Image (cartoon, rainbow, N blue to C red):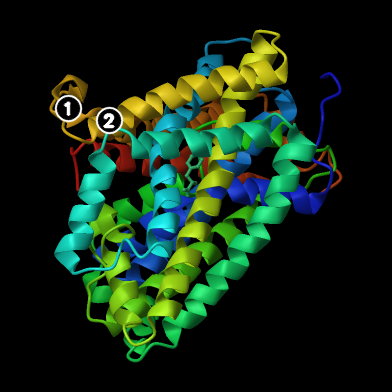
């Protein structure tokens, strides 16, 4: 069926690498502020339902296509679809992954800067100062660009070592570290006076606050957080062995991703509530609200405050890095396989091109006119086009393809590992990818275009 391809060396490595792709800024940054804006516990419950009904089938879909194809995302879609026009969904996945890499690297670079800024005490000051600090830093011409290049370079050096020695080893080291740092910050945050109000906000649902836009926000977040629709999961699945239980792996990954998102909430809300700051400030949450929170919450123990802040930004950077690796791998695998390029050279091309894209995205934040497209900065354009248009669109087409057009036998064989695992849930799976997922994704899509909600 397909040529021998390198596989992940162990089950643990495979799960950690794939979970590393999913666990990223989406968990630590986007999830808490979305929950904050949408009523806390109620949002979380809806989110979990979305992850199960929507996220799980979509992840599984990418796994099926990726493992069957045993090649980069574009070729994997070509293989399963026998070269029909459906293969363009694969190309679109690669393009989305590629475009998002540079812009994701910019935000990841900010996290690196904030490790140093908190360590050097540069973030000490009143709220107006902290907000100005972020505006000045993110719009300055040089520093954010250097950090963007730095984190892409780190990604590059992991990628060129290959799947086992690079991606798998790095994930095995970084994911447990991230988890331990997260626990330390959660415990420090929950021990603050008045922290229980934050915990309550997270876990006591108020269903009267439920509404349609909350539902759409939760669906969108589940997609983003699980890295669906960008070729990452499909590319990683091409390195899975024939023994890998795809259903169980997908379930493990959503469990880890959701658990980490909730822990991130437990890190942020108790601290924010303890100093009376509302954690619903949107994207500025981690770079403006949190430095304030850390400073005020630990006002009587500044050293501990500094330490907690440094650990927080380290864990954020680790989460970002593991996601960047998976994004980078999508394009590197594509380039090296489709253009027969040695892997290090393919990686270098991607690193350089993404650094340039990242640099332009970063520069566009300073309101430089030549980087404004349709009234939006280039940074916002990338965010919108990739995260809000291409991503759900790719997920939608993948579900339609798998549910209605893909050879049923291949899908079933991959689902059951050629009949060796139970196929009990297969009909349920088909029902989800044929009807439930496409309809829900369509709704997210229309909402993001501002047409409903
Ligand atoms: N899932 C990642 C997160 O939660 C974001 C991401 C999207 C990573 C797409 C890779 C690909 O931050």
Q: Is residue 433 above or below residue 111?
A: above
Which badge, 1 or 2, comes first in the chain's sequence?
Answer: 2
Vertical order, 224 against 388 (above or below): below
Q: Secondary structure at mark 2?
A: helix
In the rendering, at what x and y percent does residue 362 appear? 31, 33
186 or 135: nearer the viewer: 135
Considering depth in this image, is 347 or 50 the residue closer to the camera?
347
- For label 2, being within 8 Å of ligand 1 is answered no
Residue visible at 36% across and 86% down in the picture: 195
Q: Residue at x 62, y 54 (%)?
A: 253
Residue 23 visible within the image: no
What label does residue 363 carry, if any? 2
Please state, as top left, top right, bottom left or bottom right, where the N terminus lies in the image.
top right
Q: Secondary structure at mark 1?
A: loop
> Badge 1 is on which residue?
368
Q: CA distance from mark 1 to mark 2?
A: 7 Å
Whether 51 is drawn above or below 202: the answer is above
Query: Are the residues at dot 1 and dot 2 in contact (C-beta closer than 8 Å)?
Result: yes
Q: How busy is the neighbourhood of tag 2: few (under 14 within 10 Å), some, or many (20 plus)?
A: many
Res 260 visible: yes
Judge left or right: residue 452 versus residue 351: left
The residue drawn where x is 50% and y is 66% is 311
Picture coordinates of residue 53, whole percent (x, y): 50, 53
* Residue 135 placement (x, y as % from top left): 21, 48
Measured from the top left, where is residue 239 in percent x and y?
Answer: 75, 34
Place residue 28 in its image quadrant.
bottom left
């Amino acid at each position: 069926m397909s040529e021998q391809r390198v596989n992940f060396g162990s089950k643990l490595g495979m799960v950690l690498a794939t979970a590393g792709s999913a666990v990223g800024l989406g968990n630590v940054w986007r999830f808490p502020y979305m929950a904050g804006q949408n009523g806390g516990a109620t949002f979380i419950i809806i989110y979990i339902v979305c992850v199960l009904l929507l996220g799980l089938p979509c992840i599984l879909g990418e796994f099926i296509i990726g493992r069957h194809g045993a090649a980069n995302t574009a070729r994997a879609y070509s293989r399963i679809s026998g070269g029909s026009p459906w293969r363009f969904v694969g190309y679109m996945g690669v393009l989305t992954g590629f475009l998002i890499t540079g812009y994701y690297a910019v935000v990841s670079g900010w996290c690196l800067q904030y490790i140093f800024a908190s360590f050097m005490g540069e973030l000490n000051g009143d709220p107006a100062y902290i907000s100005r600090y972020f505006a000045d830093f993110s719009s300055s011409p040089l520093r954010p660009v250097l950090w963007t290049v730095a984190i892409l370079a780190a990604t590059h050096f992991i990628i060129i070592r290959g799947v086992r020695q690079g991606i798998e080893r790095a994930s095995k080291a970084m994911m447990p570290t991230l988890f331990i740092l997260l626990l330390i910050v959660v415990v420090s945050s929950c021990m603050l006076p008045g922290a229980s109000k934050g915990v309550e906000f997270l876990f006591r649902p108020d269903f009267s606050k439920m509404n349609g836009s909350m539902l759409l926000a939760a669906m969108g977040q589940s997609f983003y957080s699980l890295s669906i629709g960008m070729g990452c999961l499909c590319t990683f699945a091409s390195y899975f062995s024939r023994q890998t239980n795809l259903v169980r792996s997908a379930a493990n990954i959503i469990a880890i991703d959701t658990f980490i998102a909730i822990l991130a909430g437990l890190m942020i809300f108790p601290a924010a509530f303890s100093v009376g700051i509302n954690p619903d400030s949107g994207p500025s949450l981690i770079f403006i609200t949190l430095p304030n929170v850390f400073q005020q919450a630990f006002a009587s123990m500044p050293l501990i405050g500094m330490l907690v802040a440094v650990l927080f930004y380290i864990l954020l950077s680790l989460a970002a890095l593991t996601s960047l690796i998976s994004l980078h791998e999508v394009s590197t695998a594509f380039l090296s396989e489709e253009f027969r390029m040695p892997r290090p050279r393919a990686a270098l091309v991607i690193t350089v091109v993404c650094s340039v894209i990242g640099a332009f995205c970063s520069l566009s934040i300073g309101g430089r006119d030549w980087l404004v497209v349709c009234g939006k900065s280039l940074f916002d354009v990338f965010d919108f086009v990739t995260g809000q248009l291409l991503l759900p669109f790719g997920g939608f087409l993948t579900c339609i393809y798998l549910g209605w057009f893909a050879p049923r036998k291949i899908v079933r064989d991959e689902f059951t590992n050629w009949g060796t695992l139970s196929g009990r849930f297969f009909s349920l799976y088909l029902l989800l990818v044929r009807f439930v997922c496409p309809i829900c994704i369509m709704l997210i899509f229309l909402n993001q275009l501002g047409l409903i909600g």
